[in-house]
């Protein structure tokens, strides 16, 4: 599978399907494999490009500071490597932060923008509750196995009802997550980049068509952050998923894929 060297590291990427290009950007600590529920539906109609962010999977893992801006440069380099001048861009969680920065810095590279379970950050960011914050910060120093840690964080990533009734489906997610577990230092470098993210005073400059998606039971990136994005990005559409937690791409997979495809067809 292809790699490109950019910004001092190797970046691993994969391409599925044919059609207009669609770049998918994954969230904190996860590899491109965590798009496994999304790729089949979207690649039927689009050329879907996925990649491992710096610090995870088969991409480089430098032990130097990361930033959302630097990871946006990585995303641009993947577009270059795939021979794509401009693409629809869909980012979730940290990937949504990267997608915002990519759009603001390189608007000519982004045909349309989809932001899932993410935030503009900054002083207006609505913080998760203390239990969630402590658990996320403790991950880097935990002695638990990757699988144990994945199950420990499941209650803050999935809605209570979904986790109780769909443990086998969550187990599938976790298997993809731990196939190439993130190293503790790389996790902290990605987390620090997320905590420093702030586009609140810039997102009103986004001019491409934008779709914002958020589950109303998201504990990690609370729902009001999605509302803020939709209100501040001119003309943005907002899809609220009732009862869904942070990993809505699992909890409401078919529904969300349908909404994404409906949005993209209008572009």
Image: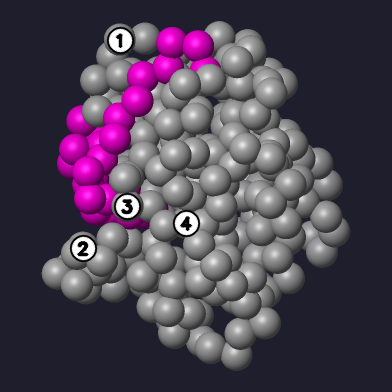
Residue 182 point in image, percent of width and height: 60, 69
Tell me, for residue 266, which label it has, or none: 1
Residue 234 point in image, percent of width and height: 50, 11
Tell me, for residue 220, which label it has, or none: 4
Task: Looking at the picture, tell me which residue is in the foreground, 187 or 122.
Answer: 122
> On the rendered structure, is 66 left or right of 190?
right
How packed is label 4: few (under 14 Cα within 10 Å), some, or many (20 or more)?
many
Residue 136's quadrant in the figure? Answer: bottom right
For marks 3 and 2, give the CA distance: 11 Å
Asked which secondary structure carries label 2, the reply is: helix
Task: Looking at the picture, tell me which residue is in the foreground, 25 or 136.
Answer: 136
Q: Which residue is mark 2?
A: 162
> On the rendered structure, is 17 left or right of 50?
left
For marks 4 and 2, give the CA distance: 16 Å
Q: Which residue is mark 3?
A: 217
Residue 224's quadrant in the figure? Answer: top left
For marks 3 and 1, give the CA distance: 28 Å
Q: Nearer the viewer, mark 2 or mark 1?
A: 2
- In this view, 51 is above or below 205: below
Looking at the image, can residue 159 be seen? Answer: yes
Q: Magenta includes 103?
A: no
Tell me what residue is drawn at x 37 percent, y 70 percent.
154
- In this view, 151 is above or below 55: below
For marks 2 and 1, give the CA distance: 32 Å
For marks 3 and 4, give the CA distance: 9 Å
Asked which secondary structure carries label 3, the reply is: loop
Task: Looking at the picture, tell me which residue is in the foreground, 181 or 17.
Answer: 181
How packed is label 2: few (under 14 Cα within 10 Å), some, or many (20 or more)?
some
Q: Earlier in the sequence, mark 2 or mark 1?
A: 2
């Amino acid at each position: 599978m292809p790699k490109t060297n950019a910004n001092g590291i190797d970046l691993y990427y994969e391409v599925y399907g044919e059609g207009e290009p669609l770049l998918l950007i994954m969230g904190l600590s996860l590899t491109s494999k965590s798009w496994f529920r999304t790729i089949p539906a979207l690649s039927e109609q689009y050329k879907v490009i996925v990649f491992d962010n710096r610090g995870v999977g088969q991409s480089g893992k430098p032990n130097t500071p990361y930033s959302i801006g630097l990871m946006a440069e990585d995303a641009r380099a993947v577009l270059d490597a795939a021979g794509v001048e401009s693409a629809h861009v869909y980012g979730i969680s940290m990937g949504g932060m990267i997608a915002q920065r990519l759009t603001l810095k390189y608007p000519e590279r982004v045909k349309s923008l989809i932001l899932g379970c993410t935030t503009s950050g900054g002083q207006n960011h609505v913080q998760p509750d203390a239990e969630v914050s402590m658990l996320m910060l403790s991950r880097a120093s935990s002695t638990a196995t990757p699988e144990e840690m994945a199950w420990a964080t499941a209650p803050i990533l999935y809605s209570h009802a979904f986790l109780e009734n769909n443990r086998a489906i969550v187990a599938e997610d976790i298997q993809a997550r731990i196939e190439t577990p993130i190293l503790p230092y790389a996790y902290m470098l990605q987390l620090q980049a997320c905590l420093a993210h702030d586009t609140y005073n810039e997102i009103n400059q986004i001019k491409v068509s934008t779709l914002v998606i958020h589950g109303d039971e998201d504990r990690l990136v609370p729902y009001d952050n999605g509302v803020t994005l939709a209100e501040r990005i001119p003309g943005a559409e907002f899809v609220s998923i009732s009862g869904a937690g942070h990993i809505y791409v699992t909890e409401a997979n078919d529904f969300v894929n349908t909404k994404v495809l409906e949005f993209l067809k209008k572009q």
